[in-house]
C-alpha cells in the first residue's frame, strides 16, 4: 500500500528533483525567504517542515537525520541553535506561501516561501547628512599634497636638472667680417676655375670626335 506517498514529480527525474528541493531548503534556512514557482514552493515546504520538526528533538539521531538532508554542518548548527528556538510556541506551521503574481515569459505562478518566525537582521547605520558648514569646507582628497612637500619637490627638481649654458651671440668685429668675405671670394674663384677647366676638356673631346 502506498499510503502517504503523495509527491509531485515536477517534470524532473527523482535524483534531480530531490537535489533541487534540498537546495531550496538550505536557502530557506540560510536567508529565511526565497522566491520560486508555486508548485516547487509547495514541495519544498513539506521538506522544510520536516527538517524543522527534527530540530525540535535535540538529539544526536535528529542531528544526523538533518545532516543527511542538508549536508552542511554549519547549517545544521544554525538550524538547532538559531532557527528552532524561534518556534518554541509552535507545533506546526513553520513556513508560509505567499502568491507573487506570474512569471514573465512562460506565465508560471510565482510564490514566496518564508519562515513564519524570522530573526531580525541588523541593519547598518545610515550615513549622517552633511550640514551646510561641512559642505562649505573643502574636502581633503587623498591625492592632495601639502604646500611644504611641494616646495621640497620643486627644490629637488632644480638641483637634479642639469644647467644649460647660454652662449651669448656677440656681433663680429670689422676685421673678422673682412676675413670672412675674403675667404668666401677665394672659394668662389676656385670653384669658377674648376668649372672653366671642365668646359675646356669637353670642347677638346668634341673636336677629336669629328
Image (cartoon, rainbow, N blue to C red):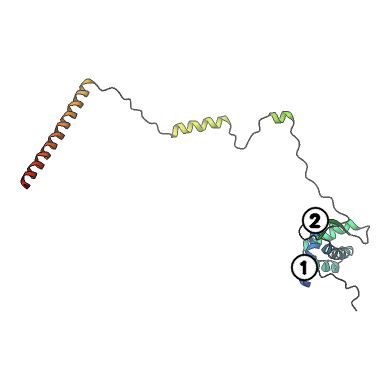
Q: Quadrant of residue 131?
A: top right
- Per the image, the residue denoted by label 2 is 31
Seen in the picture, residue 32 relative to 199 is either above or below; the reply is below
Instruction: Tell me where residue 49 appears, x and y as whole percent.
Output: 87, 63
Seen in the picture, residue 51 relative to 176 is either above or below; the reply is below
Instruction: Tell me where residue 186 appears, x and y as whole percent.
Output: 15, 30
Q: Quadrant of residue 192?
A: top left
On residue 19, which mark appears? 1
Q: Is residue 31 visible?
A: yes
Q: Residues within 10 Å of mark 1 (few under 14, many from 20)?
A: few
Seen in the picture, residue 68 relative to 198 is either above or below; the reply is below
Instruction: Tell me where residue 105 appears, x and y as whole percent.
Output: 76, 59
Residue name at image x 55 percent, y 32 percent: 149
Seen in the picture, residue 34 relative to 14 is either above or below; the reply is above
Residue name at image x 89 percent, y 63 percent: 56
Q: Is residue 70 visible?
A: no
Residues at marks 1 and 2, CA–CA distance in whole angstroms:
18 Å
Quarter containing the N terminus: bottom right
| Foreground residue among 56 and 105 | 105
- Earlier in the chain: of badge 1 and badge 2, it is 1
Could you tell whether 40 is left or right of 160 in the image?
A: right
Amino acid at each position: 500500500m502506498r499510503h502517504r506517498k503523495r509527491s509531485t514529480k515536477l517534470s524532473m527525474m527523482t535524483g534531480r528533483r530531490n537535489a533541487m528541493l534540498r537546495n531550496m531548503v538550505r536557502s530557506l534556512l540560510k536567508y529565511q525567504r526565497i522566491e520560486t514557482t508555486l508548485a516547487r514552493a509547495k514541495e519544498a515546504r513539506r521538506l522544510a517542515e520536516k527538517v524543522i520538526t527534527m530540530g525540535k528533538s535535540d538529539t544526536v539521531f535528529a542531528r544526523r537525520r538533518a545532516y543527511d538532508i542538508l549536508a552542511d554542518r554549519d547549517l545544521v548548527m544554525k538550524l538547532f541553535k538559531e532557527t528552532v528556538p524561534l518556534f518554541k510556541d509552535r507545533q506546526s506551521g513553520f513556513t508560509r506561501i505567499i502568491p507573487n503574481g506570474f512569471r514573465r515569459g512562460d506565465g508560471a505562478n510565482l510564490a514566496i516561501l518564508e519562515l513564519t518566525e524570522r530573526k531580525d537582521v541588523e541593519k547598518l547605520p545610515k550615513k549622517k547628512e552633511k550640514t551646510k558648514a561641512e559642505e562649505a569646507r573643502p574636502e581633503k582628497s587623498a591625492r592632495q599634497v601639502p604646500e611644504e612637500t611641494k616646495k621640497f619637490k620643486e627644490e629637488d627638481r632644480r638641483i637634479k636638472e642639469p644647467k644649460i649654458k647660454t652662449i651669448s651671440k656677440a656681433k663680429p668685429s670689422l676685421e673678422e667680417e673682412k676675413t670672412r668675405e675674403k675667404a668666401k671670394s677665394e672659394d668662389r674663384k676656385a670653384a669658377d676655375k674648376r668649372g672653366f677647366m671642365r668646359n675646356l676638356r669637353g670642347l677638346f673631346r668634341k673636336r677629336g670626335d669629328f
